[in-house]
Amino acid sequence: MLSLGALFGGIALAAHLVRDQLEALGRGFVERFGLAGMFIGTYLADAFSFPIPPQFYMLTAISTGGSQIPPMIAISVASLLAGCTGYRLAGHLARFRIFAARLERTRPKIDRLFDRYGYWAIAIGSISPVPFSMLCYLSGLYRVPWRYFVALVLFRVPRLLLFYALIRLGWSQ
């Protein structure tokens, strides 16, 4: 809750202090890179923990004042694909000896977590402040069953919509 409050407060403060500059940045980004830029940026952020998060692309879309549906679709689809990429990539990394030994020591704890809580473990993880890309990598490293990973990915869309709502609300202050 604290991180969500910080997101809202940061956007509201930025909208109050540097609205004109952010609107210019948003227009410039959208004019130059469009939906493809939002898609690629989100994909990089969520697949490879690129330092510019999807929330930046949401803010650029909001600050332009245009339709919000196409950008949110592009951001959501890119994020879901990126999560699958991270899961698959981490699954390959888990085969390397340097990772495999460490993972086997902690794997029983992860297995007990899913045995005890099942989908609730995914639900709680998906609303935690842990970045989505990190959750996907950990799922791949620990070879979390596909059915649990799909649930994690599906929880991403409501989380993105919550971020969008907070950014939009903060921007309108």
Image (spheres, rainbow, N blue to C red):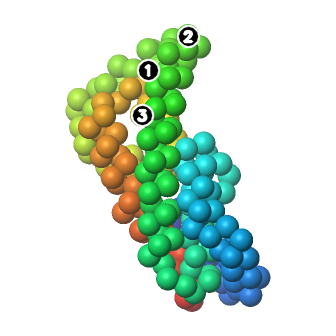
The residue sitting at 57% across, 87% down in the picture is 65
Depth check: give the residue in front, 162 or 69. Answer: 69
Q: Is residue 11 above or below residue 132?
A: below
Q: Is residue 111 above or below residue 15?
A: above
The residue sitting at 50% across, 62% down in the picture is 75
The residue sitting at 66% across, 84% down in the picture is 15
Disc with the residue nearer the chain's start (3 vs 1): 1
Q: Amino acid at mark 2?
A: Arg
Q: Quadrant of residue 104?
A: top left
Residue 89 visible to an observer of this rendering: yes
Residue located beneath label 1 in the image: 106
Distance between mark 2 and mark 3 Cα atoms: 18 Å
Depth check: give the residue in front, 104 or 95. Answer: 95
Asked if the residues shown at circle 3 and circle 1 are in contact, with their CB atoms under 8 angstroms apart, the answer is: no
Task: Give how far across and how far down residue 49 sits, in percent.
Answer: 61, 45
Disc 1 crowd, CA 10 A, few/some/many (<14, 14-19, 20+): few
The residue sitting at 67% across, 67% down in the picture is 33
Residue located beneath label 3 in the image: 139
Q: Amino acid at mark 3?
A: Ser
Depth check: give the residue in front, 146 or 6. Answer: 146
Query: Of helix, strand and loop, which one carries label 2?
Result: helix
Residue 97, label in figure:
2
Distance between mark 3 and mark 1 Cα atoms: 13 Å
Disc 2 crowd, CA 10 A, few/some/many (<14, 14-19, 20+): few
Disc with the residue nearer the chain's start (2 vs 1): 2
Please identify, in this view, whether the residue under mark 3 or under mark 1 is nearer the observer. 3
Q: State left or right for residue 131 relative to residue 23.
A: left
Query: Of helix, strand and loop, which one carries label 1?
Result: helix
Residue 102 visible to an observer of this rendering: no
Q: State left or right for residue 151 relative to residue 172.
A: left
Q: Is residue 81 above or below residue 138?
A: below
Q: Amino acid at mark 1?
A: Thr
